[in-house]
Image: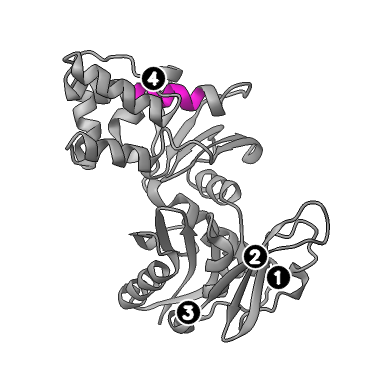
Amino acid sequence: MNKDVCLGIDVGSVSINIVLVDRDNEVLFSSYTRTEGQPLPSVRRALADMFDNMGGLNIVAAGATGSGRQLAGLLIGADVVKNEITAHATATVTYHPDVRTIFEIGGQDSKIIVIRNQMVTDFAMNTICAAGTGSFLDHQAERLKVPIQEFGDLALSATSSVRIAGRCTVFAESDMIAKQQYGFSKAEIIRGLCEALVRNYINNLGRGREMLPPFVFQGGVACNKGIAAAFKQEIGQDVIIPRHFTVMGAIGAAILAREQADLTGKPTTYRGKKALATEFNPSSFACNGCPNVCEVVKVTMDGEVVAIWGDKCGKWASSLVPVV
């Protein structure tokens, strides 16, 4: 007999995370796929991999999150589409119910989520500056000819650090080059970079917020031991890294989908393998209906409009046709 599971998908700017979670919140399948600038083909490849490896699992609900959640939700026929804050908080509270502060750093953005009594009470996101995100660390690893997998260990091997200006990617890189010319080792510079990025994160996202333990650090950058150590040093507290730290958003989406199914009792809208053959065509136009001049994104499937986003007043979005 097949085991019932819920599908969660987190489509970000750098990666696509997919999980299958059972009713006990055990992750029975997970995958991490780079978008490589083509999110929809990458989603299809990730789903095809899931279908090939899910064995005797039966998907009974599906949820989507991430910056590409709307399109991903249409593609898979998600029962719920939730923002990243809600999805990450849901997963973290499930596995660490005492958590009060969540640090999340992904490929191109970072977040802080304040939790009290298992509820989100405050949050902040940095989606403008790439300093401190995974893509910036990838770039620096490539420039320094250090495999990103060794970045954290190299930072921890340094016996001393050097102060790096981490407020901005341009300043940080210029400062790192200058410190290399002064003769500091790669290990010292990478340790200094980790400390600078955490300092920048705390100053930008944590400013004015009550950050209390237990602290949970998740997102792809949580695999970097140097960044984790820098957080511990900066806040003077231990930092918990969840077992499934790279896919917490997808887990949250799966859990929320199951809760929605339990609450409504409705059958899932999940589309199964039909998602692999679906083609979307996005286009955009400027709405001149008011001074806002919104950039409206229109998505068609087989010549039919299936989604409209970007209109602040909802003038165009009301024509959305459910995908079945």
Q: Please state the horizontal and vertical placement of residue 180, each as a whole percent of the image.
A: 20, 20
Which residue lies under the disc numbered 3? 275
* Amino acid found under the numbered disc labelled 1: Thr
Q: Nearer the viewer, mark 4 or mark 1?
A: 4
Q: Earlier in the sequence, mark 3 or mark 1?
A: 1
Q: Please state the horizontal and vertical placement of residue 155, each as a whole percent of the image.
A: 23, 26
Q: Earlier in the sequence, mark 2 or mark 4?
A: 4
Which residue lies under the disc numbered 1? 264
- Asked whether residue 254 appears in the rendered view, the answer is yes
Which residue lies under the disc numbered 4? 165
* Amino acid found under the numbered disc labelled 2: Gln
Q: Earlier in the sequence, mark 3 or mark 4?
A: 4
State if disc 1 and disc 3 touch (CB < 8 Å): no
State if disc 4 and disc 3 touch (CB < 8 Å): no
Asked if the stretch drawn in magenta spans residue 159, the answer is no
Q: Residues within 10 Å of mark 3 (few under 14, many from 20)?
A: some
State if disc 2 and disc 1 touch (CB < 8 Å): yes
Which residue lies under the disc numbered 2? 260
Q: Earlier in the sequence, mark 4 or mark 1?
A: 4
Q: Quadrant of the N terminus?
A: bottom left
Q: CA distance from mark 2 to mark 4?
A: 45 Å
